[in-house]
Image (spheres, rainbow, N blue to C red):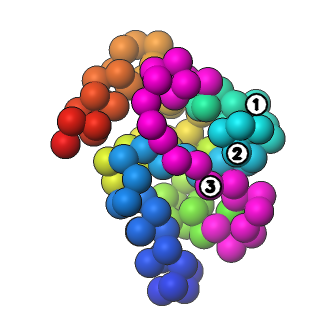
Amino acid sequence: MTPELQQRLDSLVQQNKIMVFMKGTKLMPQCGFSNNVVQILNVLGVPYETLDVLADPEIRQGIKEYSSWPTIPQVYINGEFVGGSDIFIELYNNGELQQIVEVALAS
C-alpha cells in the first residue's frame, strides 16, 4: 500500500465517527451485505458516511490490506475496525452495536 493511500484511509477512518467502506452508496447499496449494514445503521438512526469501493479500485484493494480483512463491506466506528456484515449483524442482534455506537457518538 502506498503511503498516500494509507494517509487517505487514515483520514477517512479518523474524520468520521462511523465510516462504511461498501459496494454502492447508502442510497443505493450494490450488494446484499452492504445493504444489511446500511439498513442496521438506518434503523439505529445514527449519522454515518460511506465510500463506494466500486468507484475506486485503489480503495477497494487497499481497504482489505488496511484492515487485514478480506471482504467488503467494512465498518469503522470511532477509528476502530468493527468488522463486516456478519459481525455487524451479530453485534446488532445481541445489543452490543447500540452501545458501541452510543459511546462513539458521545465522545
Give whichever of 17, 87 is nearer the camera.
Answer: 17
- Residue drawn at point x = 72 percent, y = 67 percent: 56
Q: Which mark is residue 98?
A: none
- Helix, strand or loop at label 3? It is strand
Query: What is the count of numbered marks?
Result: 3
- Span colored in magenta: 39-59
> Where is residue 55, by image quadrant?
bottom right
For residue 25, which numbered disc appears in the image?
2
Per the image, the residue denoted by label 3 is 51
Q: Are marks 2 and 1 in contact (CB under 8 Å)?
A: no
Image location of residue 1, percent across then percent down: 56, 80
Labelled pair 3, 2 in contact (Cβ < 8 Å): no
Residue kind at label 1, given as amino acid type: Gly
Question: What residue type is disc 2 on?
Answer: Thr
19 relative to 61, above or below:
above
The mark closer to the camera, 2 or 1, is 2
